[in-house]
Image: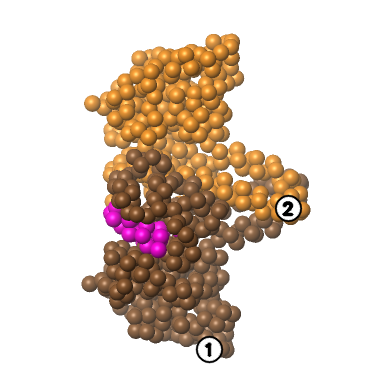
Chain colours: A orange, B brown
Amino acid sequence: MKIAVDAMGGDFAPAVVVNGALQAAEQYGIPVTLVGDGTTLEDIVGGKNPGGGVSIRHCDEVVRMDESPFKAIRSKKSSSIRIAFELVRDGQADAVVSAGNSGATLAAGLVILGRLKGVERPGIASILPGRVGDVILIDAGANVDCRPVHLLHFAFMANAFAVSCLGMKNPKVGLLSIGEEGVKGNELVKAAHGLFKESGLNFAGNVEGRDIFSGEVQVIVCDGFVGNVALKVSEGMAKAVSSMIKEEMRKSLLGKLGLIFGAHAFKRLRDSLDYETYGGAPILGINGIGIVCHGSSSERAILNGIRRAAEYLRNDVRDKLAASLGQGDSSGSREP
Amino acid sequence: MKIAVDAMGGDFAPAVVVNGALQAAEQYGIPVTLVGDGTTLEDIVGGKNPGGGVSIRHCDEVVRMDESPFKAIRSKKSSSIRIAFELVRDGQADAVVSAGNSGATLAAGLVILGRLKGVERPGIASILPGRVGDVILIDAGANVDCRPVHLLHFAFMANAFAVSCLGMKNPKVGLLSIGEEGVKGNELVKAAHGLFKESGLNFAGNVEGRDIFSGEVQVIVCDGFVGNVALKVSEGMAKAVSSMIKEEMRKSLLGKLGLIFGAHAFKRLRDSLDYETYGGAPILGINGIGIVCHGSSSERAILNGIRRAAEYLRNDVRDKLAASLGQGDSSGSREP
């Protein structure tokens, strides 16, 4: 097993990405190939790779955050994210982890590895800690303009992932909308509602933004624009509330004592909400394993993304997903 | 001055709405006309209206939450929300407050009072407490499918409202998207980006979900579907984080002490985040004052919605908005 890591992707790349990879190799024995500028990467790795678990694959180009994903992947043949997926295609690696441009990561996976049969658009599945259990939010930002059938595909894939990989039994599937009634929503959601009803999925109807945090509906489906806004709002709100409570508590002596006594609770909260802990979101629907990490990933986030990729490989996630989708043929169909 | 209140609108209507109105009349001397089923309302008011500040206007019908707004407003001529706006049209009231179907409230305002000149689609402006100041999020749920020019109109109206009514100076206007770069976003946002750049507004470019809580960009524009999801996600997250911290703190003796010492902080947090305190969102762009309250409004939320409507009347919000939009003609244009 080997994980190809896009060493040039992310707000703090390459240093933080390299260090996360070194930790994965050293602490968990996961072999990693860092893809990026060879000289720079060698400098950062330096003498910190005694076990030799980390190797380097040089490449010249990087896809920036502001680039159009498919255009960049097609024109930058030597970009780190593209080369990372090529290593998987050529049997030199088994999965890809990137904290770079998430649209480009998905595009590279699609162009280089192809799709699972029957899937029109792969989606990014963000796994969130709900109150009574995990929640999968799909799509988390890859497909900003969707047709109703794309939402249906997201639902099927996340359902299969939840069952085969997270061990959920008959997960409830909801459509993210602005009211529980079937008539509420925009044109996309109203049209998708009909498809979901006929799908044979355990469809729980429309859910609202607040249901993301309960865990009572385990698969929540939306287009990538709405999904990404929802994730960033919840991230922002968690930070705002946490610091607001701290600020308020600091205003009085009793509150200050409360803060000292409650410090552990705030740390636990940070851990359970933090994308660093969860370790990235899998791209569902490409013919292989790709993990998208948060742009501001720390060393720990990268480490956990790599661990997650290794776990998905050990659990044969790609094959299980292909099988659950009803496709025995695992060769995939490549983008033209 | 008189405020027409849709007594049949909201999850806890009519009892909670009536009690909120009674408090507004008694505690703040704001005259209110309750619109709804006469017998029911008289029963609830009972002897609690000694000053006579609350009057009742009987009507037979109610628009339910699951009804299609425009269809319901056109077919239910005797619905409480429609009659409330007719009272304003006929000079028997000056503003409308409703915790009912927000789409229907907007539709009734549009059909009965018409639009301010130059406005194609009125929008609901939610006013949120950012870290360094208030933030206006528009549209908060009225227009689920928008064209780029609608977003531009929302921006102009919220800008005018921020300047004339909230006293902001040259507020920064942002487009809610999924990346700060101009190329990020769905088709709607990318097209709107160009319009905003040429608009003469103090355009700060794209903002992300987390920027809703900072207050550094004062006007944040999106379509009503995205806006409503963002609001409900933030509401859900605030509750989730608050109860998560409490739960964690209860797990240890020190934490329990912390919770006791910090109780005041949690209360302050609840107050500052709660829609009950802010008191409803104004509909911008109709030819009059309409306030949409949260569906789960408590008595206090209704009370504050009525107070807010009175404040907007005293400040001539409608005229200031019309003037800022460059329309001297205040007759408005009515829907066909």
Residue A204 vs residue B197, the one in the foreground: B197
Residue A153 vs residue A198, the one in the foreground: A153
Alpha-carbon distance for marks 1 and 2? 45 Å
Q: Amino acid at mark 1?
A: Gly
Q: Which residue is mark 2?
A: A255
- Is residue B147 shown in magenta? yes
Position of B318 compared to A334: left or right?
A: right
**Image coordinates for residue A234, horizontal then vertical, percent:** 50, 47
Please state the extent of the stretch shown in magenta in the rendering.
B136-160
Q: Residues within 10 Å of mark 2 (few under 14, many from 20)?
A: many
Foreground label between 1 and 2: 2
Residue B151, numbered label = none
**Image coordinates for residue A26, horizontal then vertical, percent:** 58, 17
Q: Amino acid at mark 2?
A: Gly
Residue A175 vs residue B97, the one in the foreground: B97
Q: Secondary structure at mark 2?
A: helix
Q: Which residue is mark 1?
A: B52
